[in-house]
Image: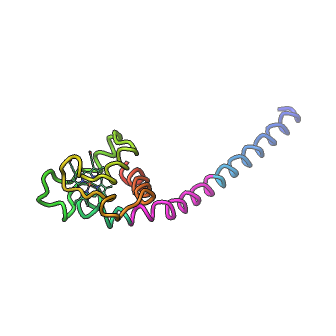
Amino acid sequence: MNRALVVLAKSINIVMVKRISLMAFGLLISLSASANAHGDHYGRGETLYQAHCAPCHGIDGDGNGPAGKGLNPSPANLLDAMQQNIISDEYLMWTIREGGRNVHTDMPSFEDNGEIDQNDAKEIIKYLRHAFE
Ligand code: HEC
């Protein structure tokens, strides 16, 4: 190989090594950023879900919570519903606000009972998308 080519090859190598370490560094940063975002972001929705939804829909969303036993119809399997990805945020919001008062199920209307306002409902929806999809 002539000299010029060797020098060229070496400098390309250095550039690539730099690129790769930059990429690895960037990946680390974004991983730790999303870990943080996770903690802050879904914590509230998760707590709300566990307090207000899990008793019927189950911690895992499978519809088998202890407070749902014997209800007819039984609580929906949210895990399945979210995985099929057919439920819009608007529909989730509506369901949480209205509960079963229009469709004659035992799901409480969280608007009526005042336990979950719109902002809290949004946090729960974010959590559902994160945890069950
Ligand atoms: C007292 C028990 C109970 C509680 C508490 C409850 N649900 Fe429900 N939920 C039900 C029942 C019963 C249904 C009706 C299932 C059906 O129509 O087959 C239902 C239906 C739903 C549906 C509709 C699913 C579909 O496919 O149409 C969604 C979404 C839902 N619940 C979300 C929630 C969320 C989010 C919370 C907490 C904020 C919650 N539920 C709290 C009992 C409950």
In the rendered view, does 11 fall on the left or right side of 80? right
Magenta stretch encompasses residue 39:
yes
* Residue at the spot 39% in from the left edge and 44% down from the top edge: 90
Which residue is outermost to the front? 112
Total numbered labels placed on residues in the image? 0
Q: Which of 23 and 129 is in front in this view?
A: 129
Q: Is residue 58 above or below residue 103?
A: below
Residue 69 point in image, percent of width and height: 14, 61
Which residue is outermost to the right? 3
Q: Quadrant of the N terminus?
A: top right
Q: Nearer the viewer, residue 117 or 21?
A: 117
Residue 86 point in image, percent of width and height: 34, 39
Q: Is residue 64 above or below residue 133?
A: below
Residue 89 image-quadrant placement: top left
In the rendered view, does 65 fall on the left or right side of 29? left
Name the main secondary structure of what is drawn in magenta. Answer: helix
Residue 78 point in image, percent of width and height: 29, 50
* Residue at the spot 40% in from the left edge and 60% down from the top edge: 117
Residue 43 point in image, percent of width and height: 45, 64
Where are the magenta residues, as a range? 27-47
* Residue at the spot 59% in from the left edge and 59% down from the top edge: 33
